[in-house]
Amino acid sequence: MASGGPEPQLVDLSSLPIQALGQMQQQVDQEIELLTNSMTSLKVVQRRFEESRESVAKVAERPVDNEMLLPLTSSLYVPAKLKDTDSLLLDVGTGFFIESSAEKAEDYFKRRVDKLTKQLEDLQSGLVEKSKLRSVVLEVLQMKIQAQSQSQGPATS
């Protein structure tokens, strides 16, 4: 293999002891929680990019010297006049801004949304696989616990 990493090994879950299955279930539960939290965060970011794209489209439609309310915070707006809709400053992260036309800005936000959509699809498929694994581990764990309780039952009576 070109990656240099070890190949994953298949393990027969029925050969694992109850304690190992319990640990495996906890690990899978943590991975599911991590994937779910990541999906939630990506959805928030995706929605913000979509809102930005919609805002750029609205600003581009406005005539020059049109009065509008400019948001300074989520609850504070100041009156402003729109001077130029052909030149926008985009915050591209970590304190960097780029000057762009409205058309290019919309395209930028669309590409970001598309990229996040793809990442969400990948996370979703990973979440489905982890959920299937969790179900299998729980099933084997329950069978082992049941078998252990049945084998101990006649010995104690």
Image (cartoon, grey):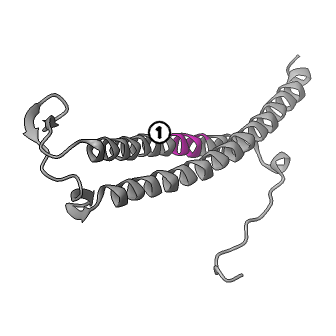
Q: Quadrant of the C terminus?
A: top right
**Which element carries disc 1, helix, strand or loop?**
helix
Task: Give the left or right position of residue 103, taking residue 133 as reference.
Answer: left
Query: What percent of the width, then of the height, locates residue 122?
Result: 61, 52
Query: What percent of the width, then of the height, locates residue 50?
Result: 41, 43
Give the dominant element type of the magenta stretch: helix, strand or loop. Answer: helix
Q: Amino acid at mark 1?
A: Thr
Give me the residue at 41% from left, 40% from top: 47
Q: Which residue is mark 1?
A: 40
Q: Please name whichever residue, 30 or 20, is drawn nearer the observer in this view of the structure.
A: 30
Query: What percent of the width, then of the height, locates residue 102?
Result: 31, 55
Q: Which residues are magenta?
A: 29-36
Q: In the image as oriented, which residue stretches furthest toward the top?
A: 157
Give me the residue at 48% from left, 45% from top: 38
Give me the residue at 74% from left, 41% from top: 132
Q: Please name whichever residue, 152 or 33, is drawn nearer the observer in this view of the structure.
A: 33
Q: Please name whichever residue, 96 or 69, is drawn nearer the observer in this view of the structure.
A: 69
> Which quarter of the figure has residue 154?
top right
Give me the residue at 80% from left, 60% from top: 10
